[in-house]
Image (cartoon, grey):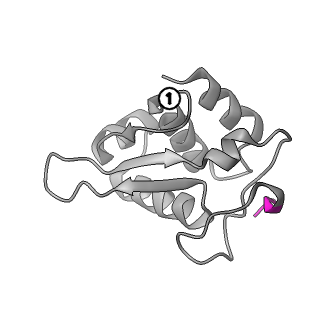
Amino acid sequence: MSSRCLAAVFERYPRASSGEFVLALVLADNAQHDGVLIFSSGDAMAHKSRQSVHDVQRHLRKMQAAGWLIKVCSGGERGRHTKYRIDPDWLGAAAPAEPALSGRPAGQRVPPGDLHQG
């Protein structure tokens, strides 16, 4: 559990649907203090965030497209989970900031100075 990541999400995660926000908290809770090594099954994330696996997958895609969540490696086969990390630039940002959650190509990282409400 990372209290640093949890605190950052509580303080600076953009306005989003409640499901997306709770998933961001679940991801932060599973992260190490530097935002890396997030790996949890879709079922576990869905259970912790009280939503369907489909909704979790949709929110994960949105977070990746915004650059807030970075896929480190794909799980691929059954029983192997995809690994993620929270954007280190976002975690290290000094001022409260909100990633753009739309209008960016998938996988493009959001520079900390270009974070705005989406």
Relative to residue 35, is residue 39 drawn left or right? left
Q: Quadrant of the C terminus?
A: bottom right
Q: Residue at x 68, y 53 (%)?
A: 16
Highlighted magenta segment, given as a residue range: 114-118
Neighbour tally class for label 1: few under 14, some 14-19, many 20 plus, Cα within 10 Å:
many
Q: Residue at x 14, y 56 (%)?
A: 77
Q: Residue at x 50, y 55 (%)?
A: 70
Relative to residue 76, is residue 114 drawn left or right? right
Position above or below: 80 against 74: above
The image quadrant of residue 110 is bottom right
Amino acid on which disc 1 is placed: Asp
39 falls in the magenta region: no
Residue found at the very far left of the displayed protein: 78
Q: Position of residue 45 (x, y in %)?
A: 38, 40
Q: Position of residue 68 (x, y in %)?
A: 60, 54
Q: Which residue is mark 1?
A: 29
**How many marks can you see?**
1
Q: Residue at x 43, y 56 (%)?
A: 71
